[in-house]
Image (tube, rainbow, N blue to C red):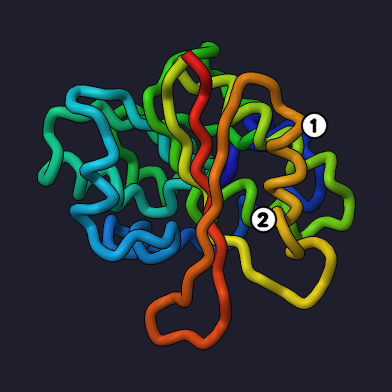
Amino acid sequence: MVDPKVFEGYSEKTQQIIKTTPTDRGIEMYADMLGFPNIDSLISEFPKGCRVLDIGAGKETLKKELAVKRPDLTVFSINPSLAHESFREANKTANAIIAINPELPVESGSFDVVIDSMGSVYYSQQEKEYTTTQAHLFEITRVLKNGGKAYIGPTFINPNTDFEGKGRVGMLLDKIRGVKWSQKEFNPPGGNTKWRSYQIEKAL
């Protein structure tokens, strides 16, 4: 059962996302979706002893696997699915926050690394208006420490203006002061489509 007060005021579309079945995504799938060739190439990006925020954590698998592979990290997760009592009982981990981007109950400059893989930015691109995606990107950069990095993806390269050149995400990142960003395009494992991911670095 979901406590209705937890998401009071959220849109009907957001409520629908909460009701969807969370996916079980571990480090290997995160590496694939962000365009890294293997697990080690992804987790080597995380500075020793840093604080990591996973937005849209599914069944909390990434956090559990990082606890084994990188016990020096402190990993937090944003997970609206934990509003479901039955899901919470089966999947709750330490440092799990029941919330939805772009309204994160997190202080500014709290994290060295933010990951949004198949999370808020991915879902926001299904909306015609850019304002939701823009709000999500602002929130991601807000919670990053100066010098911190965010990894966002995948977005799909579709034959429309939303994905030409910099894509929607790139165009919106250009409007955020104090960040540098880059993008990579790649073929997902076993797929013929093109995927794109973004890396953001917040200025010192």
Residue closest to the eye, 20 or 123:
123
Residue depicted at 21% across the width and 43% down the height:
44
Disc tally is 2
Residue corresponding to mark 2: 123
Residue depicted at 30% across the width and 32% down the height:
75
Residue closest to the eye, 204 or 70:
204
Q: Is residue 141 left or right of residue 66?
A: right
Of the two numbered discs 2 and 1 on the same chain, state the one appearing first in sequence. Answer: 1
Question: Residue 170 appears at what percent x and percent y?
Answer: 69, 46
Q: Amino acid at mark 1?
A: Gly
Report helix, strand or loop for mark 2. Answer: helix
Q: Quadrant of residue 114?
A: top left
Q: Amino acid at mark 2?
A: Tyr
Q: Is residue 81 visible?
A: no
Q: Is residue 37 visible?
A: yes
Q: Is residue 94 left or right of residue 182?
A: left
Residue depicted at 78% across the width and 52% down the height:
13
Q: Is residue 90 left or right of residue 111?
A: left
Q: Quadrant of residue 141?
A: top right
Label disc, if present, on residue 9 of the rendered structure? 1
- Disc 2 crowd rating (10 Å Cα; few below 14, some 14-19, many 20+) is some
